[in-house]
């Protein structure tokens, strides 16, 4: 099933006023079993897992294990497994590609330039995601409009043109940070301990730091780069990125 942006926008308009759980139920009913949730186990993602636990049939949950995740991320993954009785499918980068990158450019090439960082993300995240999405008709993310400059026009349903036109569901698109944490606390949802140490957004360990007072939510991700560059390639629509960079 291939979507176009016009069809996706029409449905997104219908779902804009719906709750996150209603968007999830719509997606599961329409696309199951060819729908999956890509989770990095940040605050938004554990909220979605909690919501998905109330919906049948169960949705496949997968994660991109880059090989450089913080210990705290693995810990919360295990707590989620135990709490909800779910399986988590880990998708790893291609061994040969990682070995070649580290042999030729060292272990921190991603800090040398935006191009090098995107190369590392392409190997550790983008290519594994492409494999994980193969054969699916839809996938779910924890993206929110409030998170970054590159996400302000996010819709609850999109046509993911970068992955063959499958549907992309962003049920929390209109949620605030306060709503995310209210849900976590009210429902006693396990979460990454790094959030308590000033990490609102958590990626690979060497590419993530705590944010300082007054900084934006994703300031700790690739902190040596400009805000408009802070996407790893998983969620960038090429046309929107070109327009953003052109108009500022």
Image (tube, grey):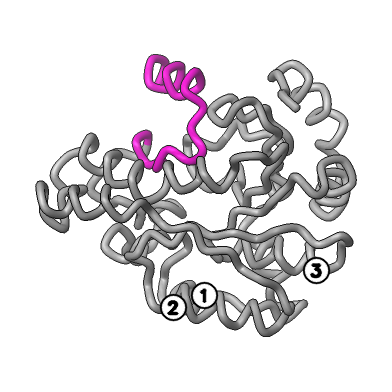
**Of 7 and 198, the residue lying toward us:** 7
Q: Secondary structure at mark 3?
A: loop
- Viewer-nearest of discs 3 and 1: 3
Q: Is residue 244 left or right of residue 53?
A: left
Q: Please say if the residues under marks 2 and 1 sit with CB atoms less than 8 Å apart.
A: yes
**Residue 51 in the image: x percent, y percent?**
79, 64
Taking the spot 67% from the left edge, 44% from the top edge, the residue there is: 139
The quadrant of the image that shows the N terminus is: top right
* Sequence-first tag of 2 and 1: 2
Q: Is residue 16 left or right of residue 235?
A: right
Q: Quadrant of residue 12?
A: top right
* Sequence-first tag of 3 and 2: 3
Question: How far apart, in angstroms, are the residues tagged by discs 3 and 2?
Answer: 22 Å
Can residue 212 be seen? no
Q: Quadrant of residue 185?
A: bottom right
Q: Is residue 43 above or below residue 34?
A: below
Residue corresponding to mark 3: 53
Question: How far apart, in angstroms, are the residues tagged by discs 2 and 1?
Answer: 6 Å
The quadrant of the image that shows the C terminus is: top left
Residue corresponding to mark 2: 72
**Residue 229 in the image: x percent, y percent?**
34, 36
Numbered disc total: 3
Residue 33's mark? none
Q: Residues within 10 Å of mark 1 (few under 14, many from 20)?
A: many
Range of the magenta residues? 228-248
Taking the spot 35% from the left edge, 53% from the top edge, the residue there is: 221
**Residue 10 in the image: x percent, y percent?**
82, 22
Q: Is residue 157 left or right of residue 101?
A: right
* Sequence-first tag of 3 and 1: 3
């Amino acid at each position: 099933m291939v979507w176009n942006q016009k069809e996706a926008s029409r449905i997104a308009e219908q779902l804009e006023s719906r709750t996150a759980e209603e968007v999830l139920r719509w997606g599961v009913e329409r696309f199951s079993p060819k729908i999956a949730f890509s989770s990095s186990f940040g605050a938004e993602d554990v909220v979605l897992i909690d919501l998905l636990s109330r919906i049948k049939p169960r949705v496949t949950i997968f994660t991109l294990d880059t090989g450089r995740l913080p210990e705290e991320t693995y810990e919360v993954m295990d707590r989620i497994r135990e709490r909800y009785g779910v399986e988590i499918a880990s998708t790893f980068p291609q061994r040969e590609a990682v070995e070649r990158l580290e042999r030729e450019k060292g272990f921190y090439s991603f800090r040398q330039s935006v191009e090098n960082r995107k190369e590392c993300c392409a190997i550790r995240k983008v290519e594994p995601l492409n494999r994980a999405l193969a054969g699916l008709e839809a996938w779910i993310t924890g993206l929110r409009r409030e998170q970054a400059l590159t996400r302000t026009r996010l819709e609850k349903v999109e046509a993911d043109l970068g992955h063959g036109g499958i549907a992309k569901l962003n049920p929390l698109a209109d949620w605030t940070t306060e709503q995310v944490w209210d849900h976590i606390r009210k429902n006693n949802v396990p979460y990454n301990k790094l959030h308590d140490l000033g990490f609102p957004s958590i990626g690979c360990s060497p590419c993530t730091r705590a944010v300082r007072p007054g900084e934006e939510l994703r300031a700790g991700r690739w902190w040596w780069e400009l805000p408009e560059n802070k996407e790893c390639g998983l969620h960038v629509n090429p046309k929107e990125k070109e327009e953003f960079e052109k108009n500022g």
